[in-house]
Image (cartoon, rainbow, N blue to C red):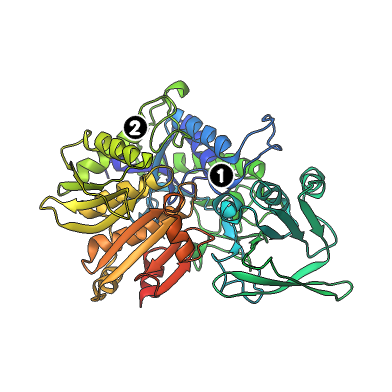
Amino acid sequence: MDPKQLYDVVIIGGGPAGLTAGLYLARAKYRVLIVEKAAFGGQITITDQVVNYPGVLHTSGRELTETMRQQAQSFGAEFLLAEVTGLSLDDTVKTVKTDRGDLSCFGVLWATGAHPRMVGFPGEEAFRGRGVAYCATCDGEFFTGRDVFVVGGGFAAAEEAVFLTKYARHVTILIRGKDFSCAPTAADMARSHPKITVLTHTQVQAVEGDSALRLLRYQNTETGQVTEYQPPEGETFGLFVFAGYQPATELLQGLAKLDPQGYVLTDKSQQTSVPGLYAAGDVCQKPLRQVVTAVGDGALAATELEKYAAACQQATGLRPAAPASTPASDIPAAQSSAPAGQSASGGLFPPEMLAQLHTVFGRMASPLVLELTLNDAPISQELAGYMEALCALTDKLTLTKTGTDPDAPCVRICRADGSWTGLAFHGVPGGHEFTSFVLGLYNAAGPGQALDAQTEAALQAIDRPTELQVLVSLSCTMCPELVTAAQRMAAANPHITAQAYDLNHFPALRDKYHVMSVPCLVVDQGKQVTFGKKNIQQLLDLLS
């Protein structure tokens, strides 16, 4: 095996645990790759305020994990945006299968974290995206000037309730137990806020409505009293659920030992029941799930993986190429508050992003034409400048402009002969959507992200015109997965089109489909409207 194609460790998950492990391994001169399917940083990136991380007086989750990413990269850790689809762990050299190809390594660290858990009250699933939400950062703005209820009594519920007061008229927290279960400082901030009411011993019985929530029924479990809330006539309201998380361990089912709730069981060294497979962070069975415990897990797992990789090197005689360190001052930020795609230093595409772009351009099998439809809005000029800068980087992309359109500003990805590939983005594909747009180019030009034979067959079986509209927010970490999946399907099947819309610039679509959560998938102009992230298989199941 060529050492250039081999890693000492592949880390699956780019949250605090994975980034910490990457930092430790790279600093110890082991070649390590961190694979993340959405955005580096993990669940903590949606947290607006972090005040209990030792040594850091006050920061946001995004800022904290971006610093971790830069640290890891400065020591030579490598990064890949891809979805892991399978593991082969029987041999000394293991294989991590992804939608961007197979990866070879000695050790694997599973650090995929967890996603919000549903409570299960009547109406929760039916009104998900139409009033029931799970991410205050992604969806809070939809409830500006309205009443909002929060279900839960943990840290997330307390903190997110305070965050929601930026938008909501009033926030009511419904706690099943006798009090908050989080640290007093977080609870006190919520309890003392003038726009927050806290109700304990309270459970949701049901939510009801039409195209949006119109009624919430909840009960005091001590007195038995049932209360029905209805918003003022002509209004709706929001119900945010923060009832814990479900571990992302689907691919480990039947492979490693899990507890009844699906959390990974590890020994004191973070090793799972499978030799060479370690786990760290919120995906593990543990009494406390915080950033500080995740980084501790990551550090411990990394030091154990150092020993494991060294033993594998000695047994096989294979030594992956050592990582190359980079001065921290030269590491650009992966995300920026500057306009779409623009780095804080003023360059439209910072060095790390340029490296990713040139890799994609080098793999594109065919040239593409980016067809712009603009209007008089300032965002149109931003889109034009963004696409002009992108096309200037390669001869694989050419830019054309067309007339005004109701869906402007828009960039359509076309073939060299001018025919449309079925992929388009309305707005500016910055923020978290930059990666999905670049993957869209790769998929449209070919060869595109690999599909297994079964998925390919199911995809090609769709023989009717199918229009997919994905309504997104550039701040949403869950949107890119759905956008990428829809675009991959459109690139492979001429019957399918996939168009993404930044809802910030298309409020008419938000109102038309009563969107109160992102991502929102609209199939065939409203024949089906669903919410939440989905992969290709889930989309195929939906369309079938």
Ranked by sequence position, the earlier of labels 1 and 2 is 1
Q: Left or right: 203 with respect to 4?
A: right
Q: Nearer the viewer, residue 319 or 15?
A: 15
Q: Residue at the location (31% across, 58% down)?
A: 487
Q: How much space separates mark 1 and mark 2, taking CA atoms? A: 22 Å
Q: Where's residue 438, x and y in %?
A: 31, 46
In which quadrant is the N terminus drawn?
A: top left
Residue bearing the label numbered 2: 349
Instruction: State the SS at label 1.
Output: helix
Image quarter of residue 139? bottom right
Q: Nearer the viewer, residue 148 or 313?
A: 148
Q: Where's residue 471, x and y in %?
A: 42, 58
For badge 1, the amino acid type reads Thr
Q: Nearer the viewer, residue 451 or 416?
A: 416
For badge 2, the amino acid type reads Phe
Q: Left or right: 487 with respect to 192?
A: left
Residue 323 seen in render: yes
Instruction: State the SS at label 2.
Output: loop
Give the number of marks: 2
Q: Where's residue 273, x and y in %?
A: 55, 59
In which quadrant is the C terminus drawn?
A: bottom left
Q: Residue at the location (69% across, 59% down)?
A: 147
Image quarter of residue 431? top left
Report the disc number at residue 312.
Answer: none
Q: Left or right: 396 with respect to 451?
A: left
Residues packed near mark 1 inside 10 Å, few (<14), some (14 to 19) or many (20 plus): many
Residue bearing the label numbered 1: 45
Residue 85 seen in render: no
264 lies above or below 46: below
